[in-house]
Image (tube, helix red, strand yellow):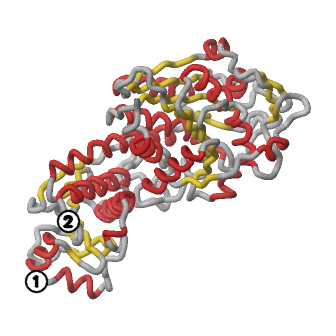
């Protein structure tokens, strides 16, 4: 597991750490505690801000070393912007910015004063303090499991932080701590997803991934692992065909969280592609960059992290997480281009390119989810196509859906968490691109609209269930650095889906 930052909440008047961050509101300046500090320093804070033309613009910062008459060695002023324009994720991002500044120097402890001019009320202050703490916690993630030399660091990376404890000073520490508990659980799910994606493929194969998921019974999840024989009995030839070239056997993991009061509540179902390493199979990928294919299980990692988050915060819903775990390798037993497989649904698939393997895994899993659980909805996540990055870059995940409400719910949650989605089209006109002369369909659709034809393929395995497909190839791994994610694996999707569940389904669950 990743190293975990300890976060505690304390009153505004409590003693500051050697490194402390103060928030400055654009147009309003410092709040009460900051104003007192400025007076005690003989106006040094105002003078430093004026000399640096620092006005409190969003995420702008200045640092003061050994400010006079203050009990800290480093004081960082962090710009808030205009607080009435900030949403939840803006405060979370601001917490990440503050932590980045505090962690950039040596020191094991730091303070963040969560007092903002223009914000009234202890409840509002507690929620802001909790959001700031979440941002700091997410930003603190580092994956150094395999670095044996102290201070070892990658080229171009910032030096490893020694900051292990952050005290968040606020008006009502007890209320902030209570508000933070849910956020702490979600961060735990994000960290688990990041850990899984960061692990090298020689350590995390299908069996090992399944074992880590099975260990989540400690969080009161119900976990079931299906082996090759069990999947063969279910006639999952599409999924099993992907992994048949590897010496490492495939697995399917079913995770259930029973939080709904009604035992008959239809579950929310989340499905993740878990290709633990993707060489492309016989249709082998170019060597350059192939090492990144250890992250081709980003969808499965997200689903696993989400299920942990829902369990840890005791979400009042019934949720099911399904992950299909395979390794796509070339060998004498590997699937060949031109092979025809019969999926669990009975539909036949002509495999023209063995590197279009994720959709084969999902085809059987989507059908299985509907057959067994009769879910209220299905959301699948997959690092499915490079084409989605051509369309959207690394800023948005591609969203495909057969249900407008589900699409809108996901988009709203994406805006709230900063894990944004962009809806892409599904239409019968694209079907002709995946029709096959030799089978019911083929697994590639040609040069154009690759992300769309992949989603169109998946839709053939959906019956009357509200369904959304998230193509996360650009956001789950090697994504853009943000205020709350500085590593190779982002854990993208855990916060998005948790927020959607909390906002749209917890209050109405029956």
Residue closer to the observer: 10 or 398 = 398
Residue 246: % across, % down: 67, 25
Residue 262 appears in the rendering: yes
Query: Which residue is disc 1 drawn over?
Result: 42
Residue 159: % across, % down: 38, 59
Side (left or right) of 119 relative to 43: right
Relative to 205, say whether 2 is above or below.
below
Residue 276 appears in the rendering: no
Residue at screen point 52% across, 55% down: 420
Residue 172: % across, % down: 14, 54
The label shown at residue 84 is none
Query: Which residue is disc 2 drawn over?
Result: 120
Tell me if label 2 and label 1 are in contact, CB under 8 Å: no
Residue at screen point 59% across, 47% down: 404
Q: How many marks?
A: 2
Residue at screen point 35% across, 32% down: 316
Side (left or right) of 178 relative to 256: left
């Amino acid at each position: 597991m990743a190293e975990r930052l300890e976060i505690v909440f304390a009153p505004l008047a409590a003693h500051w750490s050697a490194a402390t961050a103060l928030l400055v509101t654009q147009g309003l300046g410092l709040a009460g505690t900051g104003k007192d500090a400025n007076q005690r320093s003989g106006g040094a804070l105002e003078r430093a801000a004026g000399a640096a033309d620092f006005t409190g613009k969003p995420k702008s910062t200045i640092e003061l070393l050994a400010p006079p008459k203050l009990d800290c060695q480093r004081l960082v002023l962090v710009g808030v912007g205009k607080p009435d324009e900030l949403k939840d994720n803006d405060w979370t991002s601001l917490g990440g910015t503050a932590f980045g500044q505090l962690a950039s120097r040596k020191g094991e402890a730091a303070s963040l004063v969560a007092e903002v001019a223009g914000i009234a009320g202890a409840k509002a202050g507690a929620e802001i303090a909790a959001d700031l703490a979440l941002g700091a916690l997410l930003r603190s993630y580092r994956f150094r499991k395999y670095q044996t030399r102290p201070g070892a660091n990658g080229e171009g990376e910032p030096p490893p932080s020694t900051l292990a404890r952050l005290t968040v000073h606020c008006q009502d520490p007890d209320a902030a701590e209570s508000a933070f508990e849910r956020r702490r659980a979600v961060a735990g799910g994000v960290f688990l997803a990041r850990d899984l994606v960061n692990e090298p493929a020689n350590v995390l194969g299908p069996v090992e991934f399944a074992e880590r998921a099975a260990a989540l019974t400690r969080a009161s999840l119900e976990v079931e692992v299906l082996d090759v024989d069990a999947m063969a009995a279910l006639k999952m030839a599409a999924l099993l065909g992907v992994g048949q070239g590897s010496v490492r056997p495939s697995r399917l993991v079913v995770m259930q969280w029973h939080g709904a009061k009604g035992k008959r509540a239809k579950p929310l179902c989340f499905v993740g592609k878990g290709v633990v390493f993707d060489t492309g199979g016989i249709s082998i990928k170019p060597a350059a960059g192939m090492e990144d294919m250890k992250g081709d299980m980003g969808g499965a990692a997200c689903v696993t992290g989400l299920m942990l988050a829902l369990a840890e915060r005791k979400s009042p819903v019934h949720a099911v997480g399904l992950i299909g775990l395979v390794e796509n390798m070339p060998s004498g037993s590997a699937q060949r281009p031109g092979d025809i497989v019969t999926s669990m649904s009975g539909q036949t698939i002509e495999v023209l390119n063995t590197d279009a393997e994720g959709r084969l895994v999902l085809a059987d899993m989507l059908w299985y989810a509907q057959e067994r659980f009769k879910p209220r909805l299905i959301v699948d996540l997959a690092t499915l196509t490079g084409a989605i990055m051509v369309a959207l870059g690394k800023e948005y995940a591609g969203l495909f859906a057969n249900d407008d409400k589900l699409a809108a719910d996901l988009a709203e949650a994406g805006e709230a968490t900063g894990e944004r989605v962009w809806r892409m089209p599904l239409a019968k006109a694209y079907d002709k691109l995946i029709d096959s002369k030799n089978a019911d369909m083929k697994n590639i659709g040609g040069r154009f609209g690759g992300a769309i034809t992949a989603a169109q393929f998946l839709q053939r395995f959906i019956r009357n269930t509200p369904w959304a497909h998230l193509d996360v190839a650009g956001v789950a791994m090697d994504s853009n650095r943000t205020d709350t994610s500085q590593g190779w694996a982002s854990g993208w999707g855990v916060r998005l889906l948790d927020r959607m569940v909390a906002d749209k389904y917890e209050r109405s669950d029956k």
